């Protein structure tokens, strides 16, 4: 891969390519499939769209947080927090080149029932969610594709009974890139969290909003 003159994001892509066999070995099928999905998202971005490039690179960074701390690629993540200028447009070409090098992965084993558990959580239909939003639901909301029942919007994202989505839910979902990885975002909200001492969705309105945001930010930043 030609990454001469690149910033941290370009160097990170080069490291992934250099250590791609070790990356594959360190991730399970589901984690590796998520990484490929994030790389594919970056490869599809219009190179001149700086915000989209930044967002796609951050998605790759989040997928790599599953690597062991002593992995050479994991060690490079702190340089790709992307809080300043967006990466150079050429990282999109780098992602396209990297995709050609990365091995495909079979569909992840969902026999543990994780996806089914998330789909069993109380949810609104597409029409119900749009009605609560007063129009089309914003992309920050978690939207799960149910092969049996169509789109499902987990109900915890809305105040009980009526009202538009919680603002803190929108803020956390942006951190978790829910529009790219809705299943991962839903799993964060609906699973036990040692940082918070409970399930984030159940703590809405019981904890200060900034504690929820802080727990999500700690995950994103790898703390």
Image (tube, helix red, strand yellow):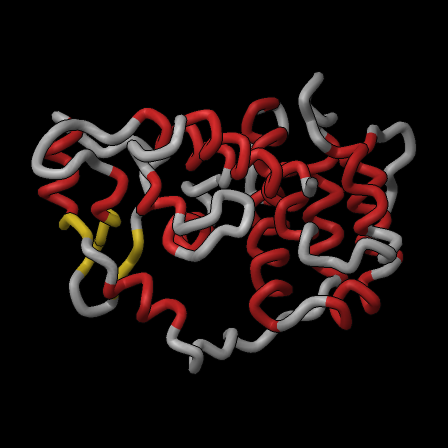
Which quadrant, please, contains the C terminus? top right
Residue at image coords 18%, 28%? 164
Q: How many marks?
A: 0
- Give the residue at x 72% y 59%: 100
In this view, the residue in front, 157 or 37, is 157
Q: Is residue 208 left or right of residue 134?
A: right
Q: Residue at x 85, y 39 (%)?
A: 11
Task: Where is residue 183? Give x, y as percent.
Answer: 41, 55
Nearer to the camera, 140 or 164: 164
In percent of width and height, residue 189 lies at 40, 48
Dividing the picture into quadrants, the one containing residue 130 is top left
Residue depicted at x 14% and y 50%: 125
In the displayed orientation, state which residue is furthest to the bottom. 111
Residue lying at the far right of the rendered structure: 4
In the displayed structure image, the side of residue 208 where residue 58 appears, left or right: right
Determine the image quadrant of residue 46.
top right
Is residue 35 rendered to the left or right of residue 167? right
> Residue 203 location, x and y as percent?
34, 41
In the picture shown, does residue 132 fall above or below 119? above
Counting from the top left corner in percent of width and height, residue 30 is at: 56, 68
Q: Give 101 or 17, whichever is nearer the viewer.
A: 17
């Amino acid at each position: 891969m030609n990454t001469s003159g690149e910033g941290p994001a370009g160097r990170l892509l080069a490291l992934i390519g250099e250590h791609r066999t070790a990356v594959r070995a360190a991730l399970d099928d589901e984690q590796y499939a998520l990484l490929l999905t994030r790389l594919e998202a970056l490869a599809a971005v219009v190179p001149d769209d700086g915000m989209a490039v930044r967002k796609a690179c951050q998605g790759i960074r989040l997928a790599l947080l599953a690597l062991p701390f002593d992995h050479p690629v994991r060690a490079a993540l702190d340089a790709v927090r992307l809080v300043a200028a967006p990466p150079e447009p050429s990282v999109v070409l780098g992602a396209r080149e990297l995709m050609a090098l990365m091995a495909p992965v079979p569909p992840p084993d969902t026999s543990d029932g994780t996806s089914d558990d998330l789909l069993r959580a109380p949810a609104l239909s597409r029409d119900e969610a749009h009605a609560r939003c007063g129009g089309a639901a914003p992309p920050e909301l978690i939207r799960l594709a149910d092969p049996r029942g169509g789109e499902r919007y987990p109900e915890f994202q809305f105040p009980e009974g009526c009202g538009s989505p919680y603002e803190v839910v929108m803020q956390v979902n942006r951190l978790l890139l829910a529009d790219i990885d809705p299943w991962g975002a839903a799993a964060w909200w609906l699973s036990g969290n040692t940082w918070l001492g409970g399930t984030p969705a159940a703590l809405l309105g019981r904890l200060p909003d900034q504690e929820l945001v802080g727990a999500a930010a700690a995950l994103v930043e790898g703390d």
